[in-house]
Image (cartoon, helix red, strand yellow):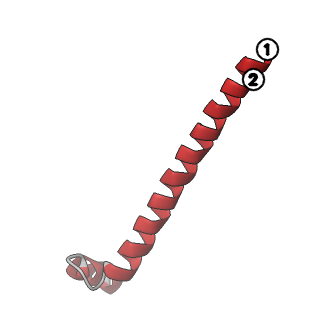
């Protein structure tokens, strides 16, 4: 394996890791937003149904 191939592999790995981190951040942010704004938003009735049961 040459140095050029190694650097290319590192670039690909960095890009994959960056994409995975970005997706995790988006999912976490979405979950937090839904937890905070969900009960106050359109899912208020569904939220009450779940808690009443």
What element does badge 1 sit on?
A: loop
What element does badge 2 sit on?
A: helix
The quadrant of the picture occupied by the C terminus is: bottom left
Q: In the displayed orientation, state which residue is furthest to the top.
A: 1
Q: Is residue 3 rendered to the left or right of residue 13? A: right
Q: Position of residue 25 (x, y in %)?
A: 51, 60
Q: Position of residue 19 (x, y in %)?
A: 53, 45
Between residues 10 and 17, which one lies in front from this camera angle?
A: 10
Which image quadrant is residue 5 in?
top right
Tell me if mark 1 has few (under 14), some (14-19) or many (20+) residues whose alpha carbon lies within 10 angstroms of its own: few
The quadrant of the picture occupied by the N terminus is: top right
Whether residue 28 is situated above or below residue 41 in the rendered picture: above
Disc number for residue 6: 2
Whether residue 13 is situated above or below residue 1 in the rendered picture: below
Which image quadrant is residue 46 in?
bottom left
Which image quadrant is residue 33 in?
bottom left
Whether residue 34 is situated above or below residue 26 in the rendered picture: below
User: Which residue is tagged 1?
Assistant: 2
Between residues 18 and 47, which one lies in front from this camera angle?
A: 18
Identify which residue is drawn at 27% across, 85% down: 40
């Amino acid at each position: 394996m040459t140095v050029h191939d190694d650097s290319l592999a590192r670039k690909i790995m960095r890009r994959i890791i960056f994409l995975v981190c970005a997706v995790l951040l988006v999912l976490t942010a979405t979950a937090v937003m839904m937890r905070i704004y969900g009960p106050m938003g359109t899912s208020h009735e569904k939220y009450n149904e779940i808690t009443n049961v």
